[in-house]
Each structure stands twice: as C-alpha cells, then as structure tokens.
Image (tube, rainbow, N blue to C red):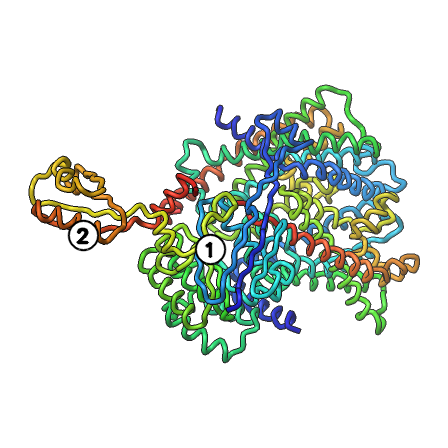
C-alpha cells in the first residue's frame, strides 16, 4: 500500500512543479464554467424550471459537473498507449507492483491535485460571480464525496480499457478521442441525462457513463431525493465491480501477447 | 512560390504515409464525425426544451455550428501544435527543424498536418446547406467568395491564438494545460455571443476572438444586419492575430534554449 | 584560405532552476523559484579553416553541444560573435542552414514512416537541389555508404548502423561546404564506424568539406582529425594539433615484455639500472611493462639490454592512447 501512496504523492509533486498550469488553470476554469452558465441561462429564458430543475440548480449542476470532471478526468489511457508503443511497458511489468493499480494511483494523485488547486478555488470564484446553490445538508456532501470517488473509478476503469486496447490496435488515438467525446455527452457533463428524450434515457440507464458525471452532479444540486441518491451510488458501485471483469480479461490476454511479441 | 511547392511535396508525402495506415484514417474520420454529431445532438436536445436561444432559432444555431466547422476543419488540418511543448521542446525536435532552410513554424505546420480533418469542412457545408434550406436562405453570387474570406479569417484567428499559446513554451519550461482548455473555450464562439454577459462577449471578441470563427461571420449569411460590421472584421482580426502570433513565435525561437542536456 | 568558422568570445548562459525539497518546498516554489545563472559556454574563441577536420572534445556537460547548437543557428548566443560561412547563424538562419549539414547521432533527421528515398526526395526539394546536382553528387554518396539496398525501406525498419549511414547521406544532399557531426558513431559497431570514417575522409578530400566532429569515441578523432579543440567547464583548454597534444601530455611509451623464463621485477630493475625506467608487472598474464620517456635512443637501448639478458617471447611497444592522455588532462587539469 505504501508504494501506491507514494505514487500519489509523487504525482502530486509533479503537478505542483508545473506552476504556469496553476495560475492559468483557475482563470480558464472559471471562464469555462461561466460560458456554460450563460448558455443555460439563455436556454432557460423566462422558464422557471425544465425537467424539474430550476435555473439555479442548473447552473450549480454545470459548475459542479466541471469541478467533478477535473477530479475524475485523466489521460492515463494516452499515457499507457505511449508507454506501450515505446516499449516501456515491459519494464513496468517487471517492477514489483500492479501496473494497472499504479496507473490508477497516478490518476488519483493528479485528480486530487486538480480538485484542490483548480476546482475548489475556481468554484469559489465562480460562486461569487454566478448564483449557485450549495447544500447545507451534511448528508448531501457525504453522498457527493462517495459518489465522485466512484466516478473517478468508473472513468479510470474505462480509461484503462481503452489504454489496454493499444496492445491490439497499436494506433488507438482515434478510439481514445471518440471515447472522450462519448463520455462528455453520455455522462451528463454537457446536458443532464433527464433532459434527453425518454427513449435515449432508457438506453443510457444500462450504460456506465451516467455514473461518471450525472450522478454526483445531481446529488450535489439536491435534485435527487436521499433514496434516489443511495440507489444511484449503489449502481455506481456495481459498475465499478462489473468493469473489473473486462479489464482483467483483456489484461491477461494483453500480457500473453506481450510475451509472444517480446514487448 | 518555393513554399507552395514545398507544401505540395509534403502533402504528397503525407498521402503516401497515410495510405499505409488506412484503418487509422477511417477511425479518425469516424471519431471526428462522432464529435460533430455530439455537438449537434447537444443543440437538438437543448431545443427540445426551448424554441429560442437568446432570440436565435434552432436552425440558425445549427447554421452557425455548420459554419464553425469549416474554419475549424482547416485549423485542425494545419495547426496541430497542441503538443508543441512535448514534441518539439522537451524531445528537442526543434533542433532538427532549426537546421533546415524553411521557416520553423511552417515546417511544423507541414510536418504535423492532418488532412483527414478537412473532412469536417464537408460536414460543415452540408450542415449549413441543410439549415440554410430550412431557413429559406438564398445564395447570392458574392456569398461563396465572402464565405471563403471569412473561413480563412476564422482559421487565422484559431491558428494565431494557438500559436501564441504554443509560444509560452519558449518562455516557461512548464507543461501547460491551457491547450486543451482553449479547445473548450473555442467552442463558445459557436453560440451567439449576445447570450453571454458583456465581459465574456468582450473576451470572445477582442482577447480570444473565437466569436470570429463562428457566430460573427455566420451572422452575415443569416442576414443579421446588426452584426455585419463584425462579420466583415473577421479577416482583419484573423490577419492581425496571426501576424502577432508570428512575431511572438520569431522572438520565441531566439529564446529557445534547446533540449536539456 | 578563408575561415569556415570564426568564434569570438562566445558565451551562453542558462538559467538553472532548482526546486526545494518536499511538499512544503514545492508550495514555496509556486510563488518564487530559486535559480542561478549557469554559463554553459564561457568566453571561447577559435577559428576553423575551410577544409579542416576538427575534433571538438570534452566531457559531458563541458559545453560541446551548446557550442554546436550556436554554430548551427539553433541557439542564440548570450554574447560574443559567431561567423560561420560568412554569416551570423541565428540571424540569417534560413539562408545559413543551406550551407551546412548537420548530423545529430541521437536524433533522426529522416522521416520515421516513409522510405529513405522519399525522405531524400523531400530534403532535395527543401534544399532546392537541382536534379543534375543531386544525381552527380548523391549517386556517389549512396554508393560509397552502400545504402542503395536500404533506400526503399522505411526508416523505422533500419538498424542503427543502417540508419546512421542514411542520416549522413541525408545531411549531404545539398553538398554543404561545412558539416557538423554530433556523436555520429555513438552505439555503432566497428565496421560501420570504419566505413563512416573512410567516407568522411573521402568527401573532405573531394569537396574540401570542413568537418567539425564531437564524439566520445576518441578513435574517431584519431582517425580523422589533425586538430582538436578541447573543452572543459565551458572553456577551451586546448586548441592545436592532436600530435602535439600527445607529445605534450603523453607519458612516454610503454614497452610490454613476455619472457620464456621466470623473471622477477628485481631482476629487471637490476638489468636496466642505468636507465630512467619504471617497471610494472601484470601478475596474471606475466606481462612486464617498462614505462619510459618517448625517446627512440632510450627505447632501443632499453630493449637491447633486456634482450641481451633474458629470453623473450613477445615484445610490444605501445604509445599512450589519446584517451589516456585526455583522461590525464581532465584528472589533473591543465597547468
């Protein structure tokens, strides 16, 4: 466990070393959330509520969805692809740790960094400019914390999956890009799932994507009742467990392939 | 003249390489299409809940998006400098570039072009025709020429901004996350700027003039006379921003310290 | 003869950032960062004449690469003057680089995915080389480097030695009067090294091409260069003929003896008592080495004495290698 914690710490330090990131990140993040806020205000126009969400809930949704994204988002699939192509992965495999676990921890280190240095200050600034609504209820915050952690795992697992495909496809930049686009839309980052037409909602219910952004954002804006929130979190947990299966299968096949090809 | 000849040499080379990996090509075009589809879906879903967006109809918004795709396609075909820092500065590839008798930025444009992105322009024009048709827009003889002018202006705006950001690498030895974020901000030019508050509108017009890639020039074809002044500023802003970015680039190259030994 | 390279009081300084340790230090680095100015190249001057082959040597970090990068127009000097082929490399970069060829041993100049000849074709256009020029010049280069069979292979499929030969050919497409080679033989096997050296000698003779060579492998320098410029800590510490470097710093000659009979060091010392000589014994191989001053008279006298007294299996006269000399210089400093 120590070595994984150490990995988080190292990643954290690495991120800190790039200080221009830090200065510009907050500014750009605020612009990002702000622009979506205006878009949604224009969409709401004179309406009080759409799909049961008020405009204030909606702007809070947008802000927190992006904030959560900064936490769960990472490029470990691209990193894996690069490492596999450059043949570094063979070296990684002889090290005394679980490669996928290590990648996950790197992602977590990065995520924690961005949470504290990008999102929270950005959120504070944005909340001065735009009317956002923060819940006073401690359970909401608790649910939210659990939920974004699970978001991180679901998103990271999907990244691991796309990363592993490099073993079979060699050039998978297109796939990685497509995945990112699909996740932005189907996770509810751009539009809450409840805004989709019913038939689309029915399909999305059976996919893991809404566990990435929709669930934590809905919890945060108090758009879910406690019961709904617990159900959604359990569903997130179930997806985390289910996704382990394809990862392990592909990983075992990939390692065999690596041995045959000799890295 | 020499630069045009060299350009076609590189294009020919590029085609040969790309044809070796045809499968990649299809995946890439497919993921581009997917990306465009997602944005259209966003617009469609939003208009499932409202009829007007700040006074603009659904088809007008779709038209703006269609227009945006064209300069954006040109930009992504020729200005793949989002990984400039890692590829050219950290790995020291700029050393090689600088030992060749062609302007360094032009060489990078040539080396990094991704012509398959041009496919996005086709999608964009198709989307514009579809939306223009439902809006009952008429095509006058001058429109294609102005379209070309505005598209080039928009491409130069995008190119200029991204070159300036790439130039940061000459001064700061840090990996920046500005690039990916800038792609996000660039998307806001696709929506009518009058839905934003005045600060953001100002930023999108004069600081990071992404509005000149989408809504301003498209407003001309939509016959929104109150925006005509901005529409015709598109090529001017494009040339100004691109020009400035080249100047910054040139002074950045002087500061280049080489890959760390 | 005109100078190909003139360097006057050339200086290049870098800002070196240092980071504080630990998490707390990292936070402080966010606000202010420690840096100091490090001179990579500190006030150096030298000339290279057209047609010379010069070895540019020094330890890692001595400032070799930085100098080469300033001479090729990649880096701007902090101060001082550089004139190469009559131009200021950085200011007139685009015009200037047409007159030089550059090979970086650790960095490919060729396009990874396309066949070697496609790269050549592209470079031919880039350097505005006419078909006739190309034919007459490159046909010869390709033949001498024996890369004909590699031309239709993509670069990524070539071995290091094959690639290096192609790199060299690529740097010569425009037949530049000046060639910079930065570690051109790094990681290559002996045969490829020999071929490259032969080739360099040939083009130097044929076209009077100036060659500036940096390398860790001093045998390259010995084979090619009459003159060496030696760098330490950003300063030129030696500039002159390789031969006089040897004479000045060579620690005499070593003569190795192997005997047919059992010999003790004491015996040898007795035999040669009248000469200035130091004997060493390699216990394992039973080789005895006499270290003497590099003086023909002295050496033949010594050998005569030993041969007269003992039965000999083998004699070998060795010069101190350049590598040893240079190591000595770096160890002791120049004085």
* Mark 2 lies on residue: C300
- Label 1 chain ID: C
Quadrant of residue A229 within the rendered picture? top right
Q: Residue furthest bottom?
A: C132
Residue A168, image x, y percentages: 46, 50
Foreground of the two, B236 or A133: B236
| SS class, disc 2 | helix
- Label 2 chain ID: C
Quadrant of residue A56 within the rendered picture? top right
| SS class, disc 1 | strand
Foreground of the two, C9 or C133: C9
Q: Is residue A46 left or right of residue A243?
A: right
* Mark 1 lies on residue: C182
Q: Dot 1: within a 10 Å radius of its alpha carbon, few (fewer than 14), some, or many (20 or more) residues?
A: many
Foreground of the two, C24 or B38: C24
Tell me, yes or no, if residue B249 can be seen here: yes
Q: Dot 2: within a 10 Å radius of its alpha carbon, few (fewer than 14), some, or many (20 or more) residues?
A: few
Residue B171, image x, y percentages: 67, 45
Q: Residue at x 74, y 59 (%)?
A: B156
Front: mark 2 or 1: 2
């Amino acid at each position: 466990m120590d070595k994984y914690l150490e990995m988080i710490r190292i990643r954290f330090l690495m991120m800190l070393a790039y200080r221009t990131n830090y200065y510009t990140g907050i500014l750009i993040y605020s612009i990002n959330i702000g622009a979506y806020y205006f878009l949604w205000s224009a969409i709401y126009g004179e309406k009080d509520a759409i799909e049961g969400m008020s405009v204030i809930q909606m702007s809070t949704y947008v802000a927190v969805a992006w904030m959560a994204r900064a936490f769960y988002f990472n490029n470990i699939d691209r990193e894996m692809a690069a490492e596999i192509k450059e043949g570094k992965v063979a070296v990684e495999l002889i090290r005394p740790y679980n490669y996928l676990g290590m990648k996950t921890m790197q992602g977590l280190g990065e995520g924690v960094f961005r949470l504290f240095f990008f999102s929270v200050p950005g959120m504070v600034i944005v909340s001065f400019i735009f009317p956002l609504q923060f819940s006073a209820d401690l359970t909401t915050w608790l649910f939210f914390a659990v939920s974004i952690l699970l978001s991180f795992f679901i998103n990271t697992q999907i990244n691991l999956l796309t990363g592993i495909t490099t073993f079979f496809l060699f050039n998978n930049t297109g796939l990685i890009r497509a995945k990112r686009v699909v996740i932005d839309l189907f996770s509810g980052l751009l539009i809450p799932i409840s805004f989709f037409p019913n038939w689309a909602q029915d399909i999305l219910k059976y996919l893991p994507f809404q566990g990435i952004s929709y669930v934590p954002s809905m919890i945060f804006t108090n758009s879910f009742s406690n019961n709904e929130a617990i159900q959604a979190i359990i569903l997130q947990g179930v997806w985390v467990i289910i996704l382990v299966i394809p990862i392990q299968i592909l990983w075992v096949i990939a390692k065999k392939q690596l041995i045959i090809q000799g890295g | 003249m020499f630069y045009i000849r060299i350009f076609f040499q590189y294009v020919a080379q590029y085609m040969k390489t790309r044809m070796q990996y045809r499968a990649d090509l299809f995946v890439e075009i497919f993921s581009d299409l997917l990306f465009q589809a997602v944005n259209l879906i966003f617009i469609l879903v939003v208009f499932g809940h409202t009829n007007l967006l700040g006074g603009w109809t659904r088809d007008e918004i779709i038209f703006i998006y269609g227009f945006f795709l064209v300069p954006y396609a040109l930009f992504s075909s020729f200005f793949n400098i989002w990984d400039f820092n890692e590829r050219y500065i950290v790995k020291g590839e700029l050393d090689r570039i600088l030992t060749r008798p062609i302007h360094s930025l032009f060489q990078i444009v040539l080396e990094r072009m991704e012509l398959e992105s041009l496919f996005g322009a086709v999608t964009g024009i198709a989307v514009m025709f579809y939306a223009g048709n439902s809006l009952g827009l008429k095509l006058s003889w001058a429109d294609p020429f102005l379209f070309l002018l505005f598209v080039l202006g928009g491409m130069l705006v995008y190119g200029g901004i991204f070159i300036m950001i790439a130039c940061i690498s000459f001064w700061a030895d840090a990996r920046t996350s500005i690039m990916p974020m800038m792609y996000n901000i660039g998307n806001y030019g696709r929506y009518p700027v009058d839905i934003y508050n005045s600060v953001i509108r100002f930023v999108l017009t004069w600081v990071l003039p992404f509005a000149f890639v989408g809504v301003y020039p498209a407003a001309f074809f939509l016959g929104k006379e109150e925006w005509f002044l901005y529409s015709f500023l598109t090529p001017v802003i494009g040339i100004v921003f691109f020009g400035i970015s080249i100047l910054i680039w040139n002074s950045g190259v002087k500061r280049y310290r080489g890959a760390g030994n | 003869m005109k100078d190909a390279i003139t360097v006057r009081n050339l200086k290049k300084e870098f800002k070196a950032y240092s980071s504080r340790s630990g998490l707390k230090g990292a936070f402080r680095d966010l606000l202010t960062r420690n840096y100091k100015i490090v001179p990579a190249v500190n006030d150096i001057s030298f000339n290279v004449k057209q047609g010379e082959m010069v070895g540019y040597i020094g330890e890692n970090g001595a400032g070799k690469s930085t100098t080469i990068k300033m001479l090729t127009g990649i880096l701007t000097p902090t101060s001082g003057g550089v004139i190469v082929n009559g131009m200021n490399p950085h200011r007139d970069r685009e015009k200037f680089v047409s007159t030089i060829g550059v090979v970086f041993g650790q960095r490919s100049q060729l396009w990874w995915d396309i066949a070697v000849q496609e790269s050549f074709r592209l470079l031919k256009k880039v350097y505005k080389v006419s078909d006739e020029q190309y034919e007459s010049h490159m046909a010869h280069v390709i033949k001498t480097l024996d890369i004909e069979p590699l031309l239709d292979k993509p670069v990524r499929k070539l071995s290091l030695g094959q690639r290096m030969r192609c790199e060299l050919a690529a740097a010569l497409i425009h037949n530049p009067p000046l060639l910079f080679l930065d570690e051109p033989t790094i990681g290559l096997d002996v045969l490829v090294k020999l071929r490259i050296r032969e080739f360099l000698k040939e083009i130097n003779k044929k076209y009077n091409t100036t060659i500036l060579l940096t390398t860790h492998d001093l045998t390259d320098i010995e084979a090619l260069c009459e003159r060496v410029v030696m760098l330490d800590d950003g300063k030129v510490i030696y500039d002159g003929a390789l031969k006089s470097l040897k004479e000045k710093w060579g620690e005499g000659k070593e003569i190795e003896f192997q005997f047919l009979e059992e010999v003790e060091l004491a015996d040898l010392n007795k035999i040669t008592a009248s000469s200035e000589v130091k004997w060493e014994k390699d216990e394992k191989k039973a080789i005895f080495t006499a270290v003497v001053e590099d003086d023909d008279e002295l050496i033949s006298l010594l050998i005569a004495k030993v041969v007269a007294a003992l039965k000999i299996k083998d004699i070998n006269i060795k010069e101190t290698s350049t590598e040893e000399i240079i190591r000595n210089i770096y160890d002791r400093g120049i004085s």
